[in-house]
Amino acid sequence: MQIPSWVEYEIQNWARMHWVGSMPGPRRIGQEARQCMYPFQDVEEDEPGYETVNYERAQQVEGIYQKLPHEDRRVLHAEYTRVKEYGNMPDHIRAAVASKKIGITVSYYKLALLSFRKKVWGAFK
C-alpha cells in the first residue's frame, strides 16, 4: 500500500503551523520562546516559495498528533518540527540517531511514522 504524496503535504502544512503566529511550536528547555527550528523560517510571505498555512486542515492533523503517545510525538518532532536539530540528516541516519535519543528502536520509529501518515490519510479520505 502506497501512501499518497498529498499526505506528506498535509503533514508539512501542520509543521508550518507550529512555526508561525502565536504558536511557536515545540522547543527545548532553555531555548528562547520565539526561536524557530523550522527549515523555512526565513521565507517572507511575499517571497517565492512561501506557502500559507491552511489552519483548518492543520488543526485536523494536530488533533491526530495530540492523541499519540509521547514517544510517537518525539518521532514527529525529529521528522518534521525539529529537523534542524538533526542537521537535516538523510532519513535513515536521522531515524537511527533520533530513535537512540528517544529510547526506542529504529523499527518502532519507522512504524510510528508510518502509523501517523496512515492516520492523516484516513482523516482526509
Image (spheres, grey):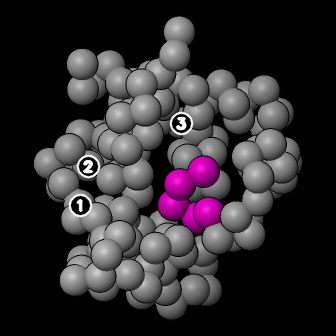
* Image quadrant in which you'd find residue 22: bottom left
Crowding near the residue tagged with mark 2, few <14, some 14–19, many ≥20 C-alpha atoms within 10 Å: some
* Image quadrant in which you'd find residue 9: top left
The prevailing secondary structure element of the residues shown in magenta is helix
Residue 81 in the image, given as x and y percentages of width and height: 51, 61
Question: How many marks on residues?
Answer: 3
Q: Earlier in the sequence, mark 1 or mark 2?
A: 1
What residue is pinned by disc 2?
Answer: 58
Could you say whether the residue bearing mark 3 is in a helix, strand or loop?
Answer: loop
Residue drawn where x is 43% and y is 40% of the image: 8
What residue is pinned by disc 3?
Answer: 69
In this view of the protein, which residue sits in the foreground, 23 or 70? Answer: 23
Vertical placement of residue 29 versus 113, above or below: below
Residue 110 in the image, given as x and y percentages of width and height: 69, 31
* Image quadrant in which you'd find residue 89: bottom right
What residue is pinned by disc 1?
Answer: 53
Q: Is residue 42 visible?
A: yes
Amino acid type, label 3: Pro
What's the CA distance linking mark 1 and mark 3? 25 Å
**Residue stretch rendered in magenta on the structure:** 79-83
Residue furthest out toward the top: 1
Q: Earlier in the sequence, mark 2 or mark 3?
A: 2
Label 1 with label 2: CB-CB less than 8 Å: yes
Amino acid type, label 1: Val
In this view of the protein, which residue sits in the foreground, 4 or 69? Answer: 4
Amino acid type, label 2: Ala
Could you say whether the residue bearing mark 2 is in a helix, strand or loop?
Answer: helix
